[in-house]
Image (spheres, rainbow, N blue to C red):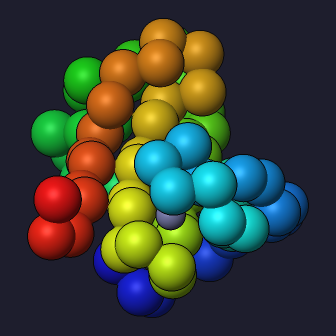
């Protein structure tokens, strides 16, 4: 997932720990066929990454379907 090219990014509050996290807007074409089929209405997904608590959330922008989520150590 580190090869993904973000169209834009913004800083948000991590929904888990409240620290500053980065949210990236990504073109869905960079994801696997399985994910594209799960979010057929979407062209974009957001990827929220918090380096403070290792929170990771990947969401389809329109359908709000969770593509990938990860929380370390909790
Ligand atoms: Zn966090």
Q: Residue furthest bottom?
A: 3
Position of residue 32 in the picture relative to residue 60 (left or right)? left
Q: Is residue 47 visible?
A: no
Q: Is residue 33 visible?
A: yes
Residue sitting nearer the eye, 6 or 47: 47
Position of residue 36 in the picture relative to residue 43 (left or right)? left
The residue shown at (66%, 66%) is 19
Could you tell me which quadrant the N terminus lies in?
bottom left
Q: What x and y, as percent, mark residue 74?
A: 17, 59
Q: Is residue 10 above or below residue 62?
A: below
Q: What x and y, as percent, mark residue 65?
A: 36, 21
Q: Is residue 6 above or below residue 36?
A: below
The residue shown at (60%, 27%) is 61
Q: How many marks?
A: 0
Position of residue 52 in the picture relative to residue 13 (left or right)? left
Q: What x and y, as percent, mark residue 25?
A: 69, 53
Instruction: Quadrant for residue 2, please give it.
Output: bottom left
Residue sitting nearer the eye, 40 or 56: 56
The residue shown at (37%, 74%) is 54
Residue sitting nearer the eye, 29 or 53: 53
Q: Is residue 65 above or below residue 66?
A: above
Position of residue 73 in the picture relative to residue 62 (left or right)? left
Q: What x and y, as percent, mark residue 58?
A: 42, 47
The residue shown at (63%, 55%) is 18
């Amino acid at each position: 997932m580190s090869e993904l090219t973000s169209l834009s990014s913004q800083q948000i509050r991590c929904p888990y720990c409240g620290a500053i996290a980065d949210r990236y807007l990504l073109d869905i074409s960079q994801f696997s066929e399985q994910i594209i089929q799960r979010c057929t209405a979407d062209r974009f997904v957001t990827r929220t990454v918090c380096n403070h608590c290792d929170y990771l959330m990947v969401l389809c922008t329109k359908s709000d379907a969770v593509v990938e989520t990860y929380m370390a150590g909790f």
